[in-house]
Image: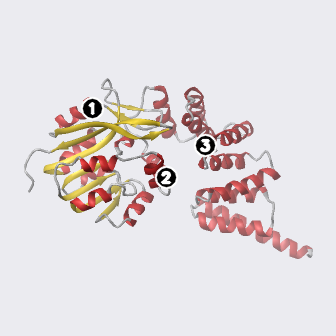
Amino acid sequence: MSQSAGDARFEQARALFREGIAHYEAGRMDAAERAFAGSLALLPGRPSTLTNLGAARLKLGRVPEAVQVLREALALEPDNAEALGHLAAGLAELGQADQALAALERALQLQPAAGAAWLLQATLLRERGDAEAARRSYRQALAHGADPQLAAFALGALEGTGAPPAPPQHYVEQLFDNYADGFDAHLVEALQYRAPQVLAEGLARPRHASALDLGCGTGLAAPWLRPRCDRLEGVDLSAAMVARARARHLYDEVRQGDLVSILASTSRRHDLLFAADVFIYVGALEAVFAGAARVLSPGGEFCFSVEAADDADDWTLRMSLRYAHSERYIRMLARQHGFAVRHVARHPLRIDQGRPIAGLFAWLDRPGHAA
């Protein structure tokens, strides 16, 4: 190859690399991935290109491919802190926590002010149950510019004081956007989740004119609700979950949005409000009950499941970053907002790390006669 041809090839590869960076920063991950791959085809073995290609593939959910090219980058440039951070994220996605933590340790030695790396390390340490080490990492994450809401939220759970009454909305949205693809199989098969069935089987009325599935997720409750509802609507914060629920074709309508805001503002009325394992990501439930009282028709039913907390607490934020609620709190809110508690039952909600999670299942009635 002549020098001029080589120079032209280099310039073309560099232009594609810059194009990939622009696409990545604008959130156009498909275009970014194509540009980085094209640049790499022209100039193979460039650690910076491999690193950015891996980052784009991570964003696209192509995790094994991302890990492969990030390992290639690190074989060429072992002290590439950026590649180590992305590799750790990919390994964490694949469930390889020990390898991810090893990559993070090296990345933070090289770049100790990397807030995102501290945050991921803290998350992995919390998930493995190492509370004290997780606390230290969350504090480092805060000190180095990581998401302050998320770090403070997690510290509230770990320290048992100052826990916020609600999680950061973007945390919940991102959590379930990322979880959408494998949600049904993981929850039902691996975690033995039966909350929608238990709640539906406990309903008092054989049929409802209009039901609202709060935090509907992928629509796991829809097969249990559709046969007994003339109209079935769903709402969920996660766009990916909403898309999955719509694809079931069992709902008349599924909206994306925050359930508290929708209960406070909608002009629609329903005679069934259904919330299976949703309030664990809501926290304090005063606004939920106020909205439910506003939206539920006289004679209607409001049923839900929560993780069970001791009656000494209204609610508590657990190390899992899920909220638990006490029966005393549920009964107090029902009384304050004009609901009659028809039945409360205790059943395991799901299996978590081999252990059943104690749950409360509640069926409330709004006094009055259905229209």
Question: Looking at the picture, how far across and down is residue 144, in whole percent?
Answer: 61, 37
Q: Which residue is at a point 46% across and 37% down the rendered structure image?
A: 321
Q: Secondary structure at mark 1?
A: helix
Callout 3 amino acid: Ala
Of the numbered discs 2 and 1, the one sitting upstream in the chain is: 2
Q: Would you say 178 lies left or right of 11 here?
A: left
Q: Give coordinates of residue 151: x percent, y percent.
A: 52, 37
Q: Amino acid at mark 2?
A: Tyr
148, above or below 243, in the image:
above
- Residue positioned most to the top: 312
N-terminal of the pair, mark 3 or mark 2, is: 3
**Residue type for callout 1:** Glu
Q: Position of residue 363 (x, y in %)?
A: 22, 42
- From the image, state whether disc 1 or disc 3 is nearer to you: 1
- Residue pointed to by mark 3: 116
The residue indicated by pointer 2 is: 179
Q: Nearer the viewer, residue 321 or 304?
A: 304
Q: Does 205 sit above or below residue 155? A: below
Q: Secondary structure at mark 2?
A: helix
Q: Secondary structure at mark 3?
A: helix
Most distant residue in the right direction:
2
Instruction: From the image, tell me which residue sits under label 1.
Output: 327
Mark 3 vs mark 2, foreground winner is: 2
Instruction: Evaluate if marks 3 and 2 touch, with contact meaning CB atoms under 8 Å apart.
Output: no
Residues at circles 1 and 3 in contact by the CB criterion of under 8 Å: no
